[in-house]
Image (cartoon, helix red, strand yellow):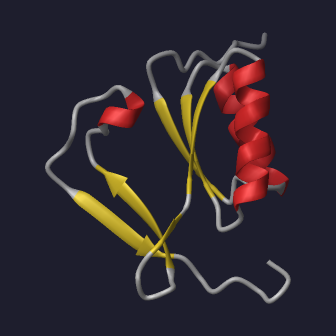
Amino acid sequence: MTEKLDLQERVALVTGASRGIGYHVAKKLAAAGAHVIAVARTVGGLEELDDEIQAAGGQATPSTYRGADGNQYLVVVAGGHGSTGTRAGDHIIAYRLGAASPSQ
């Protein structure tokens, strides 16, 4: 027996969401009802993903951030953030992403 995954009112964070496995996982999570926070170094794939998720009736927030130092970061606010419709948390966690290859 196969059970349908129900992620209504949940937030899913997917890194590497601009292509490949991350792209497809993000679409599946959104189809199950999650609001997907899609993170990647490349913006083009995130915009395409966002368009596809929204066209299917889902919710996504594409996210990429480049600091003043030129590095890219993933910033997670524990407990949520206003842009996702959840309450702000007390903790912020930031990860520096690895350097992109010259082709990115």
Nearer to me, 74 or 104: 104
In the image, taking residue 40 as reference, residue 92 lies left or right, namely left
Residue at (19% x, 43% y) in the render = 89
Q: Residue furthest front?
A: 68
Q: Where residue 58 appears, x then y in whole percent?
A: 65, 21
Indicate the quadrant containing the C terminus: top left, top right, bottom left or bottom right: bottom right
In the image, taking residue 39 as reference, residue 70 lies left or right, namely left
Q: Residue furthest left?
A: 90
Q: Where residue 100 appears, x then y in whole percent?
A: 70, 83
Q: Where residue 46 appears, x then y in whole percent?
A: 71, 50
For residue 2, what is the image quadrant?
A: top right
Q: Work out whether 82 lies above or below 16.
A: above
Q: Where residue 76 appears, x then y in whole percent?
A: 37, 55
Nearer to me, 13 or 83: 83
Residue at (40% x, 32% y) in the render = 84
Q: Disc count in the image?
A: 0
In the image, taking residue 104 as reference, residue 71 lies left or right, namely left
Residue at (71% x, 65% y) in the render = 42
In the image, taking residue 42 as reference, residue 89 lies left or right, namely left
Indicate the quadrant containing the N terminus: top left, top right, bottom left or bottom right: top right
For residue 9, what is the image quadrant?
A: top left
Residue at (30% x, 28% y) in the render = 86
